Image (cartoon, rainbow, N blue to C red):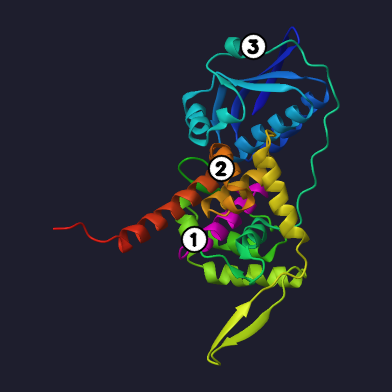
């Protein structure tokens, strides 16, 4: 993708041309960062020449909007093509970045120029993987067991977590129809590299839902590996107990709860506030919402207030959306199975 730049008073107008996907994302991200760091505080990104955007491309836009907000500026999107408009509407991007039908309307939306400030550096990436973070969110801290969830819900959440991690590593990309491998380079993470080998066994691109189900079918093995990593990190410890001297139950109480507190505090602050989350936080919000694990972070009064914001943020990631859809279908099937038949 290429970007041409022009100005209209204090407003910087960037016209995008081509495709915004895994191949063009790194250079586009650097270009947008340079423009913001150079002092642009009112930016319109004209999408009329953008032919295609993938989930990786959406994260570039989200990151740019977050940088702009940190710099106390404003960014707007304008004139998307039909394909781009469809994916922006599907993910609800307009709730995060203003979207206008024309560049003229986007320009008109800006208030007088905001004094420039130095952009804040990006926060360091968390040490825990998505799979580890979602597992800790699902863990009952006191009992050391997973909180009650519908069967296979955590399996699907962990499958989504693996795919999201690979997407942010630049190894896969997705749009509304397919998932494709974009790089076969090893990640250095054994769990992710094993997942990559599975993905590469099917040379023809498959729908995202296909791979979500494929990895969810390996849920027990994935859970064991995630648990093993958390034990190795010194976050959990393994305790074997026996019930009635027959059934052995394995529990994983917390040793160090700093990671759990950090994850929960970060999500709570983001959801209660108005900041634009970074792509990693969007992923965790999406997975936590899919498993219905976020309500525990808030009081009943707060839950009513933040429900719409959680829904809006959770839509922003395509893999997260597909994970949520799969889990809601599981819940629907279970509900239908236990629902009494209508009276004759």
Q: Tell me where residue 329 appears, x and y as whole percent.
A: 40, 53
Q: Tell me where residue 295 appears, x and y as whole percent.
A: 57, 50
How far, Cα to Cα, is label 1 from label 3?
45 Å
Task: Please name which of the two marks, 1 or 3, marks the residue nearer to the observer.
Answer: 1
How far, Cα to Cα, is label 3 from label 2?
29 Å
**Image: 243 above or below 324:** below
Q: Tell me where residue 311 appears, x and y as whole percent.
A: 53, 40
**Could you tell me if the residues under marks 1 and 2 are in contact, i.e. CB atoms within 8 Å?**
no
Reading the chain from its start, which is encountered first: label 3 or label 2? 3
Label 1 crowd bin: few (<14), some (14–19), many (20+), radius 10 Å: many
How far, Cα to Cα, is label 1 from label 2?
17 Å
Q: Quadrant of the C terminus?
A: bottom left
**Image: 321 above or below 74:** below
- Residue at 56% from the left image edge and 65% from the top image edge: 147
Question: Could you say which is closer to the camera, residue 95 or residue 171?
Answer: 95
**Could you tell me if the residues under marks 1 and 3 are in contact, i.e. CB atoms within 8 Å?**
no
**Could you tell me if the residues under marks 3 and 2 are in contact, i.e. CB atoms within 8 Å?**
no
- Residue at 72% from the left image edge and 50% from the top image edge: 265
Q: Write down the residue under mark 1.
A: 153
Question: Could you say which is closer to the camera, residue 101 or residue 150?
Answer: 150
Label 3 crowd bin: few (<14), some (14–19), many (20+), radius 10 Å: some
Q: Quadrant of residue 249?
A: bottom right
Label 2 crowd bin: few (<14), some (14–19), many (20+), radius 10 Å: many
Element marked by disc 2: helix
Determine which of the numbered discs, if any, sits on residue 107 in the image. Answer: 3
Element marked by disc 1: helix
Question: Could you say which is closer to the camera, residue 191 or residue 18?
Answer: 191
Q: Write down the residue under mark 2.
A: 314
Element marked by disc 3: helix
Q: Quadrant of the N terminus?
A: top right
Residue 192 visible here: yes
What range is drawn magenta here?
Answer: 149-172
């Amino acid at each position: 993708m290429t970007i041409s730049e022009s100005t209209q008073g204090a407003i910087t107008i960037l016209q995008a041309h081509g495709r915004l996907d895994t191949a063009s994302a790194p250079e586009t991200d650097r270009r947008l960062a340079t423009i913001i760091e150079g002092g642009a505080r009112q930016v319109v990104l004209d999408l009329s020449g953008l032919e295609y955007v993938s989930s990786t491309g959406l994260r570039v836009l989200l990151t740019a909007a977050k940088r702009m907000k940190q710099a106390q500026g404003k960014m707007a999107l304008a004139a998307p093509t039909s394909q781009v408009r469809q994916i922006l509407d599907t993910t609800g991007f307009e709730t995060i970045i203003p979207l206008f039908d024309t560049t003229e309307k986007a320009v008109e939306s800006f208030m007088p120029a905001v004094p420039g400030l130095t952009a804040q550096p990006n926060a360091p990436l968390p040490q825990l993987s998505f799979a580890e973070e979602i597992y800790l969110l699902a863990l009952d801290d006191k009992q050391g067991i997973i909180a009650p969830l519908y069967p296979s819900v955590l399996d699907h959440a962990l499958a989504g977590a693996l795919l999201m991690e690979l997407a942010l590593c630049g190894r896969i990309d997705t749009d509304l129809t397919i998932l494709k491998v974009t790089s076969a380079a090893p990640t250095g993470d054994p769990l992710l590299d094993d997942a990559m080998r599975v993905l590469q066994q099917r040379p023809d691109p498959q729908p995202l839902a296909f791979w979500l189900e494929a990895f969810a079918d390996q849920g027990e093995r994935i859970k064991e590996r995630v648990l093993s990593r958390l034990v190795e990190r010194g976050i959990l410890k393994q305790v074997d107990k026996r019930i009635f001297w027959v059934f052995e139950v394995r529990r994983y109480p917390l040793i160090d709860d700093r990671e759990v507190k950090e994850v929960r505090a970060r999500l709570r602050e983001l959801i209660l506030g108005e900041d634009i989350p970074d792509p990693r936080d969007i992923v965790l919000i999406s997975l936590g919402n899919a498993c219905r694990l976020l309500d525990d972070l808030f009081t009943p009064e707060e839950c009513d207030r933040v429900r719409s914001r959680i829904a809006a943020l959770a839509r922003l990631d395509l893999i997260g959306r597909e994970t949520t859809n799969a889990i809601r279908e599981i819940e629907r099937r279970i509900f239908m199975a236990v629902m009494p038949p209508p009276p004759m």
